[in-house]
Amino acid sequence: MFICQKVCRGGWWLWVGVCWFALGTTPVLAWNQAGHATVAAIAYGQLQPRARVRVAAILRQHPEYAEWTRDVPPEQSSFIAFLSASYWVDDIKFDRRQGFSDREPPPSTHPAYPDMRVHGTWHYVNRPLAAPGVAIPPDFQIVAPDGGALGKIVEIEDILRHSPPDSPRQAYYLAWLIHLVGDVHQPLHTVARCSKNNPQGDQGGNLFIVRPTAGTPLDGPRKPNLHAFWDNAALDTFSLPAIQALAQELSRKRPSRQRIAAPPVRWLDESTQLARDLVYQAGQDNTPEPPVLSHAYKARAHAAARERVRLAGFRLAARLNQLYDRP
């Protein structure tokens, strides 16, 4: 994935369709890039003018801004940078240029980077769900020591609110906030299901093998799983026209003021409930053959995933307007 992006980044609207095949062969991360970019596109359309100007100025300080906007028309630069920032923290998991890592990261290479860690545990919270007849282990770890997604959203908002507006660190943490708001609206970033096959949890559905269709092969390097299916459920075409069209469609119906203003813990509650009520209705993970996802299940998942993307976009805009639409 990273190699393709480095070659193609100049002219975002041209290369996005080319890079999609590579995503199918890389580890699943969160919403796919199209999903995160759709959340961002919805949010960008809801930003107040002053907030939009400030967000654009902040992202111009990001070390990757030149790459994000290479060959992009000036009038589109802020928008494309905002969309690119939405999945940058997934990109760094494959970044070999600058050396991002959670093993032995090098010292920070830019004033914008507090460190060079990937921070993989920031993306999720493992609220345990139990399959019938299975007990949740007493030592089950719900939240990583660094606080996980919910703790990081709260912490990052505080950093953005209180750090100098011209600090290059704002760009780093803003990219994280844009991404994490999307992450926690993906139901499998909030739960792990304990079953007979996976007594310590299924890693947010990554260990729950499924067949999206009856003929899906299971002999590849990465077997199709429930998490991967839900990552792609909102939009599986990574092209700017598709992202803009979906963002425009989902923006037509504005959520209620109460739903938009709900605190982040409520976002996770909703995702957890959706995992319980729909996601794990895909079947059981202890059958001789992985369950085949039915047409009815896929249709319900498609609608539910798009609703989560819609809510994430409006909620992200509301948080950014609170942070930046002020004197």
Image: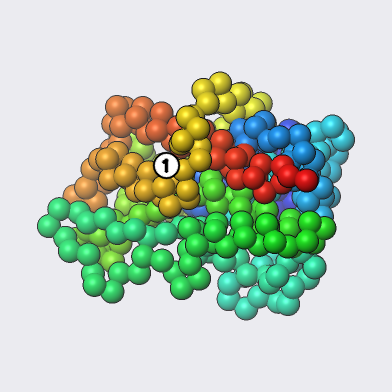
Q: Is residue 211 rendered to the left or right of residue 322?
A: left
Residue sitting at 36 percent across and 65 percent down?
142
Task: Name the image quarter holding residue 141.
Answer: bottom left
Disc 1 crowd rating (10 Å Cα; few below 14, some 14-19, many 20+) is many
Residue in view at x 62 percent, y 48 percent:
178
Measured along the vertical axis of the image, is residue 309 above or below residue 208? above
Q: Residue at x 31, y 27 (%)?
A: 295
Image position, residue 241 (x, y; %): 66, 26
Can you give x and y, in whole percent of width and height, for residue 317 in the image? 62, 39
Q: SS of the residue at dot 1?
A: helix
Q: How is the image coloured?
A: rainbow
Q: Position of residue 235 (x, y in %)?
A: 52, 33
| Amino acid found under the numbered disc labelled 1 | Trp
Q: Please indicate whether residue 155 sits to the left or right of residue 241 in the image.
A: left
**What residue would you read off at disc 1?**
230
Does residue 144 appear in the picture of this structure?
Answer: yes
Kindly identify the residue that appears in the image at 30 percent across and 69 percent down: 140
Q: Does residue 305 appear to the left or right of 72 in the view shown?
A: left
**Place of residue 262 in the rendered image (x, y in percent of width and height, measured from the top left):** 46, 43
Instruction: Out of 12 and 47, give the one closest to the viewer.
Output: 47
